[in-house]
Amino acid sequence: MKIQRAIDYIKLYHRDINEEILFDMLNEGRWEFFKSTGEYRTTIKFSTVVNKRYYDLNQGISKIFTVYANDVKIPMLQGDIIIDDDEWGTPTNAVTTSSTSNDRYWYVSNSAKIGIVEKLPNAITRDEKTTNYQSPSSIYEVTIHYEGIPRTIGTASDRSAFLWNESGDSSANAFTPSDTAVRATINYAIKEIALIPGANQDLKLAQEFQSKFDKAVKESRKHVKNRSRSTGNIVQTHF
């Protein structure tokens, strides 16, 4: 659903509402739905660069679930690496990786970047310290499965955009929502506006749309649970 259509629908209940407030309520609805359900999940991909350890994470990422390198799941590194990547130092510290390893790990740095490393015995030695981890020694594709954060909407250009960026968005905000996500966001906005003291206040309407929002959240949680459930059962089929 386009944002303008959502605005038109909300105005069926709150005809004279200030549009700045209306956008605020839509944003609150998106956040509340995101926090209550965890439905905002998608993936991003990038390729490693030889000797480059750290890669920017889009600000739309709130939680990383899994990371794959060349379609092979790699574990999250536990603990700290005592020798950090050479790209943080001066050119005189540069170390070019000469050996390769498929034993790969990922972690998130203090600067909110994702680090990709390879484990190799005595990979780097510096100042009489040795680490078994080095930066990527080859180019390969990394895929991150994550939970995202909805971007803030509220400009004139947003009116023609989708309420939940259902398509045409290659950023970390892109994902395919259920219809429930769209309905829940609108229900929340109608409810919140109905609670504002003044001409738009309608406690009965607020209660009605709170119930609708709660029902949508319950549906979405079930959807997320079923989506993430998998089995290894093989069922015999007769032809």
Image: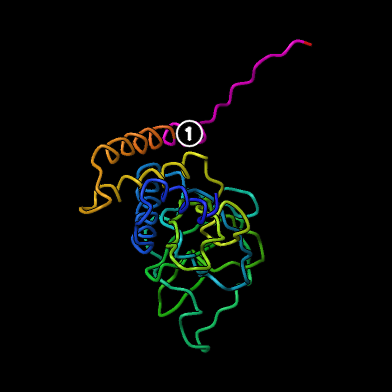
Q: Residues within 10 Å of mark 1 (few under 14, many from 20)?
A: some
State the residue position of label 1. Answer: 223
Q: Is 94 rendered above or below residue 33?
A: below
Q: Is 218 rendered above or below residue 156?
A: above
**Between 5 and 144, which is closer to the camera in this rendering?**
5
Q: Residue at x 47, y 52 (%)?
A: 8
Residue 227 lies, in percent from the top left, at 52, 35
**Between 81 and 226, which is closer to the camera in this rendering?**
226
Q: Would residue 190 be found to the left or right of residue 204 on screen? A: right
Query: What is the magenta range?
Result: 220-238
Q: Would residue 206 be found to the left or right of residue 91 on screen? A: left
Residue 159 lies, in percent from the top left, at 52, 61
**Between 88 and 179, which is closer to the camera in this rendering?**
179
Residue 189 lies, in percent from the top left, at 36, 49
Residue 99 lies, in percent from the top left, at 63, 67
Residue 14 magenta-highlighted: no
Which image quarter is the C terminus in? top right
Coloring scheme of the render? Answer: rainbow
Taking the view exactly as shown, the residue that stands out farthest to the left is 197
Q: Is 86 rendered above or below residue 136?
A: below
